[in-house]
Image: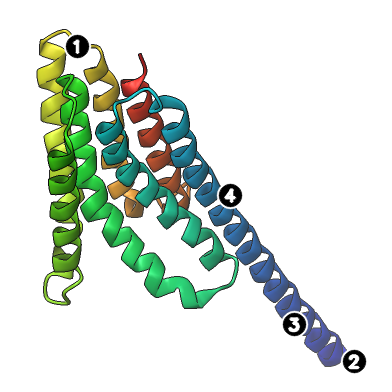
Amino acid sequence: MLFILSSVSLASLKKLGKSRRIFVNYVMIFSHILSGSILAGTGFGVFWHFFQRVSLFNRLIWGFFLLTVSLAALISIFLFAGIPSLEPLHSSMIVLSDSLGVVCAVVGVWGLLNRRTYSLTTFISTVLFGLLLFIVLLLPEVRVFTPVIPSLAILILMLLAVFSLLQRNKRGLWVVLAAMMMGLATKAQLMTSFIHPTDFNHYTSALALYFFGKAAER
């Protein structure tokens, strides 16, 4: 009799443990979808709210940066919702945002802090360089260096912002904050003790986009 009760208890515990794991998994998926939605919405919202009064080609350059990040987040929502076939597209979009996106961010910040109005030639040159970098990073033997590009861009952004602050340009402060958030996003894997790295990356990236928008605010 005791053996039967022990077997039943053990089976119940296993079933309870399995149910708990399923529940935790669903909560994690919901958390990823929520944070991804916030990031995607922030990117579209920042572009719409803060960059409408920016000159055409400057706005387009910012648009490539903001929208590549937003599209990568948007695709991740469907990926976490249960469409695993989107994984290759999601990976490619992340590489695109880490190449074309960050190139446009650096050029956009340079124009913003120095009050430059870009021409069609500058816009095309920026996009072509970013796309070339994207194509190169897709090569298997080069793709391992993908994380180096955002890190280098963050360093350049910080230098531009600090130089701008020395000239008493208040926009530099928002760029510093944005670059700090971008830097934290690259360290998401170290934040596993209190939040999932995916969610941490999404939230810090959303803050970075918002700070870039504040830098452009007049």
Amino acid under label 3? Leu
Amino acid under label 1? Asn
Q: Position of residue 173 (x, y in %)?
A: 25, 18
CB contact under 8 Å: marks 2 and 4: no
Q: Give neighbour class at mark 2: few <14, some 14-19, many 20+ (Cα, 10 Å).
A: few
Tell me how far mark 2 sits from mark 4, CA to CA.
49 Å
Sooner in the amino-acid sequence: mark 2 or mark 4: 2
* 4 vs 3, front mark: 4
Nearest to the observer: residue 15 or residue 46 = 46
Q: How many marks?
A: 4
Residue depicted at x 48% and y 61%? 75
Sooner in the amino-acid sequence: mark 1 or mark 4: 4
Q: Which mark is residue 34?
A: 4
- Residue 181 horizontal side relative to residue 45, left or right: left
Q: Which mark is residue 10?
A: 3
Q: Position of residue 84 (x, y in %)?
A: 51, 76
Q: Give neighbour class at mark 3: few <14, some 14-19, many 20+ (Cα, 10 Å).
A: few
Q: Position of residue 24 (x, y in %)?
A: 63, 62
Q: Which residue is disc 2 drawn over? A: 1
* 2 vs 4, front mark: 4
Amino acid under label 2? Met
- Residue 2 horizontal side relative to residue 26, left or right: right
Tell me how far mark 1 sits from mark 3, CA to CA.
67 Å
Q: Position of residue 30 (x, y in %)?
A: 62, 56
Give the SS element for disc 4.
helix
Sooner in the amino-acid sequence: mark 1 or mark 3: 3
Q: Give neighbour class at mark 1: few <14, some 14-19, many 20+ (Cα, 10 Å).
A: some
Q: Which residue is disc 1 drawn over? A: 169
Give the SS element for disc 2.
loop
Residue depicted at x 79% and y 88%? 7
Sooner in the amino-acid sequence: mark 3 or mark 2: 2
